[in-house]
């Protein structure tokens, strides 16, 4: 096989939607064999959202390079088949409500009894313990519960829906970090481990730079006065004459001095040394009035020659089409064989190794495409495979 970081690592993924599928796809990008175990109805995101070349873009963004095996885990034959696969797995990922895998007979206790080397990770909204552990929650509920939705407010002062599924994505990364550490340790001890990953815990771990007022002064944030939330003149969004916007994103005094000097207002530099809040209002007012005088394109040219942190507020379509993004290979056109062929757009690989780099395999599995191959290799007969897979899904479902 080609040289890849995760050569020989076999992953069984029972999770759905975002956190589990995202991190197992990153493992697939680096050579792991990832087997998606889907119910007869399939991974829900197969049918969610906009499609490209016969498949949902969301599904493409989480399932490239994986195999699909259908198991109806309500059937004892399917549980037996899963345990056969689990005996050969290095990593198992699940994201059911706490307690479900144990009741099904495929939890860590059952699997580690036959495969003590397995690294088994459970991802749940609030983790496996605590008074809220049984509560169902998707990303926005967790962000709201944790106090993060209050940090993003529109100009009308009302909270806005979070624009990034941060709880999903950070738990994906924490799960992958935890799994890789456990695999590293297994080389020394020969024993795997069980990881209890909470989406809320993972999200809280990202609050390092905003908990100052809460931890230091036991108070909530006053957003208009806080660093990073509008209290700094040089960490803010400004409108231009054409209704476009740009951002200043570095409140270090040297950057403030560079821009204010270029704009002929060195008298305002000292105000930028004040803490975020009302003291900086005159600078904000000046910058607001200044940027409103000319269209964004004018300011892009003007700022290009000044050492200051700034960026235009691009649309997502514009942002993903820039030369920088293309140069880094973070958006790629890739030819696929399955799903009728054709070229598909893919998000690139964010972890760039000098040796043994990851590689995009754009092929996504049809529902149950690898059921026979994988379960046959595990020693099941055709009849056992049919029984374990349950009734066939309605025709035409991808």
Image (cartoon, rainbow, N blue to C red):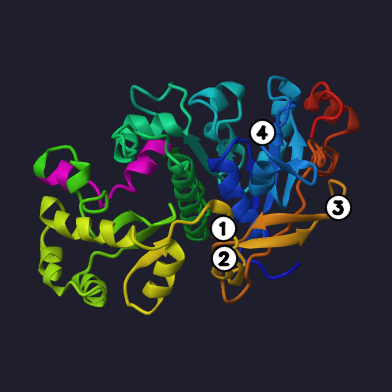
**Going by the image, does 146 lie left or right of 214?**
right
Vertical order, 372 against 240 (above or below): above
Q: Secondary structure beneath disc 4?
A: loop
Please identify, in this view, whether the residue under mark 3 or under mark 1 is nearer the observer: 1
| Disc on the earlier residue, 3 or 1 | 1
| Mark 2, residue position | 322
- Comparing 115 with 291, the one in front is 291
Q: Residue at x 47, y 57 (%)?
A: 185
The reply to whether callout 1 and callout 2 are in contact (CB within 8 Å) is: yes
Pinpoint residue 182: horizontal percent, then vertical percent. Answer: 48, 53
| Mark 3, residue position | 341
- Comparing 205 with 317, the one in front is 317
Q: Residues within 10 Å of mark 1 (few under 14, many from 20)?
A: few
| Mark 1, residue position | 318
- Comparing 245 with 95, the one in front is 245
Q: Secondary structure beneath disc 1?
A: helix
Mark 3 and mark 1: Cα distance apart in space: 27 Å
Q: Secondary structure beneath disc 2?
A: loop
Q: Residues within 10 Å of mark 3 (few under 14, many from 20)?
A: few
- Farthest residue, direction right: 382
Mark 1 and mark 2: Cα distance apart in space: 7 Å
Q: Which residues are magenta?
A: 199-216
Within the magenta stretch, is there residue 206?
yes
């Amino acid at each position: 096989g080609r040289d890849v970081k995760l050569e020989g690592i076999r992953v069984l993924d029972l999770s759905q939607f975002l956190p589990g599928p995202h991190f197992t796809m990153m493992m697939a990008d680096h050579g792991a064999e990832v087997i998606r175990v889907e119910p007869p109805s399939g991974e829900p995101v197969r049918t969610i959202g906009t499609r490209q070349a016969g498949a949902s873009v969301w599904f493409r963004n989480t399932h490239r390079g994986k195999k699909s095996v259908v198991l109806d885990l309500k059937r004892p034959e399917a549980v037996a088949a899963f345990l056969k696969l689990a005996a050969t797995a290095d990593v198992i990922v699940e994201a059911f409500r706490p307690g479900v895998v144990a009741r099904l007979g495929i939890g860590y206790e059952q699997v580690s009894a036959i495969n003590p080397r397995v690294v088994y990770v459970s991802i749940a909204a609030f983790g496996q313990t605590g008074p809220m552990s049984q509560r169902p929650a998707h990303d926005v509920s967790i962000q709201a519960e944790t106090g993060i939705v209050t940090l993003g407010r529109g100009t009308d002062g009302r909270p806005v829906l979070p624009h990034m599924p941060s709880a999903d994505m950070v738990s994906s990364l924490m799960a992958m970090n935890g799994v890789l550490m456990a695999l590293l340790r297994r080389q020394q001890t020969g024993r795997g481990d069980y990881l209890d990953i909470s989406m809320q815990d993972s999200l809280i771990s990202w609050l390092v730079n905003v908990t100052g007022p809460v931890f230091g002064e036991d108070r909530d944030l006053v957003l208009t006065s806080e660093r990073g939330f509008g209290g700094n003149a040089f960490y803010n969004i400004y409108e231009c004459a054409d209704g476009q916007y740009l951002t200043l994103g570095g409140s270090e005094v040297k950057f403030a001095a560079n821009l204010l000097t270029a704009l002929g207002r060195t008298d305002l530099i000292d105000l930028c040394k004040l803490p975020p809040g009302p003291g900086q209002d005159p600078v904000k007012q000046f910058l607001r009035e200044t940027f409103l005088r000319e269209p964004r394109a004018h300011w892009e040219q003007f700022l290009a020659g000044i050492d200051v942190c700034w960026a235009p507020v691009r649309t997502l379509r514009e942002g993903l089409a820039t030369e920088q993004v293309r140069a880094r290979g973070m958006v790629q056109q890739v030819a696929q064989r399955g799903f009728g062929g054709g070229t598909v757009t893919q998000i690139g690989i964010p972890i760039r190794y000098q040796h043994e780099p990851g590689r995009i395999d754009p092929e996504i599995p049809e529902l149950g495409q690898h059921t026979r191959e994988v379960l046959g290799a595990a020693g099941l007969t055709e009849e056992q495979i049919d029984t374990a897979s349950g009734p066939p899904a309605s025709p035409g479902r991808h």
